[in-house]
Image: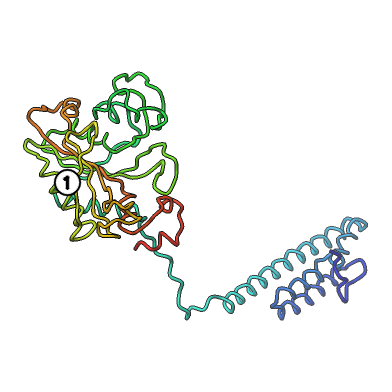
Amino acid sequence: MTEPEPSGAQPAGLTLGQIDAQWEAFSSEIADAQRPEKLEQLRVKYLGRKSPAAAGLKQLGVLPPEQRAALGKRLNVFKVEVERRLAEAAQRASAATSRTAGPDLTLPGDAPAAGRLHPITQTMQAILDCFVPMGFEVVEGPEIEYEFYNFDALNIPKDHPSREAFDTFFVDAPTDRPREGARLLRSHTSPVQIRAMQRRRPPLRIVVPGRVWRPDPLDASHSFMFHQVEGLMVDSRVTFADLKGILSAFLTRYFGPGTATRFRPHFFPFTEPSAEVDIACSACRGHGCSTCEQKGWIEILGCGMVHPNVFKAVGYPADRVQGFAFGMGVERLCMLKYGIRDIRVFFENDLRVLEQFQ
């Protein structure tokens, strides 16, 4: 950009007296300059390419040495002082602008958005709050497990379909630990029960929350990653009646008074006898609707008495101890309680959904 020719500029050459006159003129003008545009005009007028100071610098090369030294020193002092005064004036102008255009402290402030727990976390905590008062201890364990803990110690045979690569996420092949086998992403939280029984002797009451992985196709009711809460109780005299009483108490507390339950015979490799637990459909009250697929009942969890082979795997005397185990999907319980029809909404981070859970 070409700087405008300042009014009153000398065409060429400067004397010491003219430099002093320029300083006096500048000092007078900057005293009244408060706006940034006015300060820029003064900079161009007194230090720009067409200013008398610039012309004086150009003439230094043709002056005798003694005149060149005196005039050069005076011009340098003039330039430094002008720049200092301009910077000070600009700082004062900026401070004045901030004071006049700052925030209005009399206005109400903007409160930051309050965070909240994810519905899965809330549901998992609600489940644990039901079992802890009944004497159960919360225990957690590794999410990358060995085949021994995920399958072998749970009485799952070598040819079971769940041990195939299409049904389990394997991390690597067996290495230098042949007893433990290959590593994998745990497909249930039951391995933590095995580890707890290896470390501790009966009596034992634990609940195990956590994430699990299975290579299921992603749809409205399935996900490759979901959450479980499993429980285990072992003592010298534990019966199926204890199991039924504890689970009935849990379901009544979680879903509300008057919740009807039923136990159906089932099969699990790690429990015998085994059962599936259902609750009466809250939408149709057991008469049959689309929510319960016209059955009147909704499957909630699986359970059973711990198989003797599981006790043998952890070193418990199977002839002197008894126990029961159960497991439930956290997402499923949350969906049933709040009427959510698609498991994918839990992981899409849609605030319109998540903000509904206080």
What colour scheme governs how the chains and residues are painted in the rendered image of this protein?
rainbow
Which quadrant is the C terminus positioned in?
Answer: bottom left
Q: Position of residue 291 (x, y in %)?
A: 34, 55
Q: Is residue 163 above or below residue 264?
A: above
Which residue is under mark 1? 136
- SS for dot 1: loop
Residue sitting nearer the eye, 338 or 100: 338
Q: Is residue 111 left or right of residue 1?
A: left
Query: Residue 228 falls in which quadrant of the image?
Result: top left
Which quadrant is the N terminus positioned in?
Answer: bottom right
Q: Is residue 290 left or right of residue 276?
A: right
Residue sitting nearer the eye, 63 or 227: 227
Q: Answer few, some or many: residues within 10 Å of disc 1's Cα (few below 14, many 20 plus, some between 14 and 19).
A: some
Residue sitting nearer the eye, 235 or 90: 235
Q: Is residue 59 above or below residue 182?
A: below
Q: Position of residue 58 (x, y in %)?
A: 89, 59
Say which residue appears at 42% left-offset and 30% top-offset.
166
Q: Number of marks in the image?
A: 1
Say which residue appears at 86% left-offset and 58% top-offset.
68
Give, as a three-letter code, the residue at label 1.
Phe
Q: Position of residue 257 (x, y in %)?
A: 18, 61
Query: Residue 310 falls in which quadrant of the image?
Result: top left
Q: Position of residue 238 (x, y in %)?
A: 9, 39
Query: Residue 165 falls in which quadrant of the image?
Result: top left
Q: Is residue 270 above or below residue 336?
A: above
Q: Is residue 295 above or below residue 7?
A: above
Q: Is residue 340 left or right of residue 193?
A: right
Say which residue appears at 24% left-offset and 57% top-offset.
255
Residue sitting nearer the eye, 229 or 13: 229
